Structure formats: C-alpha cells, structure tokens
Image: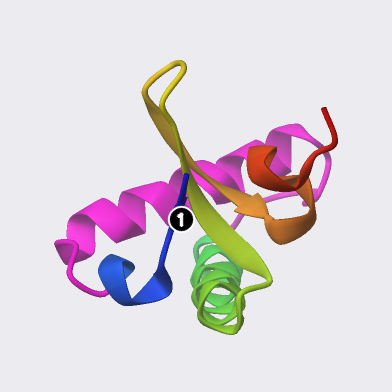
Amino acid sequence: MLIPYSALQQLPADTLNNLIREYLLSQVEDGGFDTLSDELLQTATQRCRDALKKGELVVEYSEEDESIAIRSRDNTIGTQAG
C-alpha cells in the first residue's frame, strides 16, 4: 500500500528522517554512493524529500511483512506484474 505524500507530512520529523536515512543507507550498500559524508547526506536527504514530493519516490507499507520503506515508484509492489 502506498502512503500519500500528504500523510508523510503528518509524521513526526524524526520518523520521516529515519525512513529517508534508511533508504539512503540502502543506496550506499547497493553502490549508489561511494561514500556518505555529512554534507553528502544532507544533500541526498533534501533530494530524497524532493523526489518524495514529486512522486518519483514513494513510501510503501507492506502488509505481508509489516514493513515500510521508500522505493522508486517503478519498483513498488503495486506496480509489479504478477
């Protein structure tokens, strides 16, 4: 289930920041970043927020395993053929 951007704005700031940080750290592990300095983390965090606002990234809740994660809109469960 996709969580609308408007609902994300109602989350406590720490909750959204933690979701973004988890997403960015997964990008480091996947090779999306070579390193993750404080400055790069701040820039990447703002880019992630902008992408969420534009709908390029979405927050998806998986009822199956009761998890929540930021994903590319193209990689969400709801858009995969099955």
Rendered residue at 41%/26% (across/down): 63
Residue 55 percent coordinates (x, y): 61, 75
Residue 12 percent coordinates (x, y): 14, 62
Magenta extent: 9-37
**Helix, strand or loop for disc 1:** helix
Residue 8 percent coordinates (x, y): 31, 66
Rendered residue at 33%/59% (across/down): 17
Residue 26 located within the stretch drawn in magenta: yes
Q: How is the image coloured?
A: rainbow
Residue 30 percent coordinates (x, y): 79, 35
Q: Is residue 8 left or right of residue 76?
A: left
**Residue farthest to the top, as pictured:** 65
Query: What amino acid does circle 1 point to?
Result: Ile
Residue 22 located within the stretch drawn in magenta: yes
Choose between 62 and 43: the one closer to the eye.
Answer: 62
Picture quarter with the C terminus: top right
Rendered residue at 51%/68% (across/down): 45
Rendered residue at 80%/39% (across/down): 80
> Which residue is identified by label 1?
20
* In the rendered image, the vertical position of residue 10 relative to residue 64, given as above or below: below
Q: Is residue 30 left or right of residue 62?
A: right
